[in-house]
Structures are given as C-alpha cells and as structure tokens.
Amino acid sequence: MDSTRWRSTRALALSAITVGSILTATGTAAAGPSGPDVSSWQHVDGRFIDWFAVKRAGHDFAMVKATEGVNYVNPYFVPDSLLMRAAGVARGTYHYARPNLAPEPQAALYATVVLGQNGPMDLPPVLDLENAGGLDPGGLINWTHRYLNTVQALTGRVPIIYTYPNFWKTAMANTTEFTRYPLWIADYRGNEHPEVPGGWPTWTFWQTTDGGSIPGIAGGTDVNVYSGAQGDFARYANIAGLFGSRGVSDGPGGGSGA
C-alpha cells in the first residue's frame, strides 16, 4: 500500500486474475467492485489523478492515504477526495500505522483529517498495519485494539484492517482477536483466492497487485477488489447517504460487540 513497505521482500506477481472470476476464501465466486489505492506516490511530478478516467475504466471505489503517524497528512488527500466524489468514485481512506507512537493521537489525527469518514460515498475507516514499530506481538496487539477502539468511537463505524499474511502471522502472532473487523488482505501470488490469516472466515477487500495500470493514474498502482462479504456495496459505501451517517451497519459482523 505504501511505497516504504515490503516491496523489496516479495516477488511482484502482476495479477493474472480476472476480477470478475475472483474467488473468496471459502471458494464462492465473487464479481465485486474494483478500485485502486493511492498515496502521494501516484502523483508523479505533482500531477493530479484523473478520477473521471478511473471511473470510466470501471472502478467504483478507491482507497486514499490520509495520514501517517501523528503529524503527516497526505498533501493530495483533499483534492483526491473532492475529485473522486465528483467522479462518482466511493472513497476509502487509510491511516498508515506507526506503532512506536501512541495510538490515540494517531486515531484522532486520522478522524479529524477525513472528517469522520462517515458521509455519503464513504467506506469505513482503514488501519494500514504493516509496521510493528519495534513492539513485540503482545504490545502490538494491545496497540491495535486501542487504535481501532478510538477510531470507532470517533467515527461510529467498524474499521477495516489492512495487512498481509506474513506480517500478521509473525508480528501479530497470528492472533484471532480481530475477526470482528473486516479484512483487507494484500496477496500478490496470483492464486484463486488470497491467504487469510488470523482466523478470519473470509476477506472483504483483496489487494491483488501493486503493479496495476489504471487509466488516469500515472505509473503503477495497487488494485483491489471487494468480495461482497459485508453485503451490498452501495450500502457499505454509504452511496448517496441513503442509510444515514452514524447509522451505517457496515454489513454482517458490524456493530460494537467484541
């Protein structure tokens, strides 16, 4: 997701998967909406993304980096948010975790910048967890609980966790404590379905490649697909605000239960 992550430690597997025939972790066919995720790195030479071209290419959503740590805000976040809404592209936003710093200020920064991530055409908030920050698994698990609880309290929505299998199995000791949160998994190996760690019954979003090409975006970009695990995409993305702001159920498994 972020260019500073584990690109040098894995082989690039350009997606050989046709989105319309992707299988869920349980083997059920899923012809879900697709979309990129972007940060400042996709703004080559300061160029803006043509979100209308992204939409015309058939992509219904995009994930945009909002914040990192306690003081970084993506300088392209506001124009991306405005232009993708104008183009009819549902907005997901994510915070890149820095677990060497306290989670609550990070959650507060994120929720403030994204204006709660709870308006029309907003997907739930996302925690991008791929850096242990020097914490052992017990410490990182505690940090993650604290961050997610704070973001949910501030936004009223059940957050999504983004990670990749090896990180979860090692840095998080493959804990099963987070299965109530929807999973966005990065797995580029070109299999029929991604590896799902941590006891999750299935995945909600799958990042199939970090080397995709999408009209309107300069250079390579990550590409993702929605499985349908949280129900109708229009409802999950709060399309047109038809389901209210703080009343979004976020699909099966939503709510505030442990």
Image (cartoon, rainbow, N blue to C red):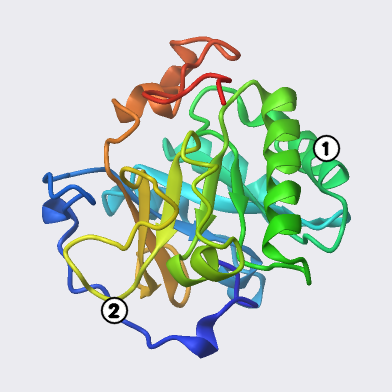
Of the residues shown, which amino acid type is indicated by label 1? Ala
The local secondary structure at tag 2 comes to loop
Q: Looking at the image, tell me whether mark 2 or mark 1 is earlier in sequence order.
A: 2
Which residue is depicted at the point 35% across and 57% down? 196
Q: Is residue 70 left or right of residue 210?
A: right
Which residue corresponds to the image point at 76% horizontal and 32% vertical from the top-left?
150
Q: Nearer the viewer, mark 2 or mark 1?
A: 1
Would you call the spot at circle 1 few (<14 residues within 10 Å), some (14-19), or many (20 or more)? some
**In terms of depth relative to the viewer, which is nearer, 84 or 114?**
114
Q: Amino acid at mark 2?
A: Leu
Asked whether residue 75 appears in the rendered view, the answer is no
Residue 12 visible in the snapshot: yes
Q: Which residue is mark 1?
A: 108
In the displayed structure, does residue 130 sit left or right of residue 186? right
| x, y percent for residue 215 | 35, 64
- Residue 14 bears which disc, if any? 2
Q: Say which quarter of the image contains residue 46.
A: bottom right
Q: Is residue 52 left or right of residue 80?
A: left
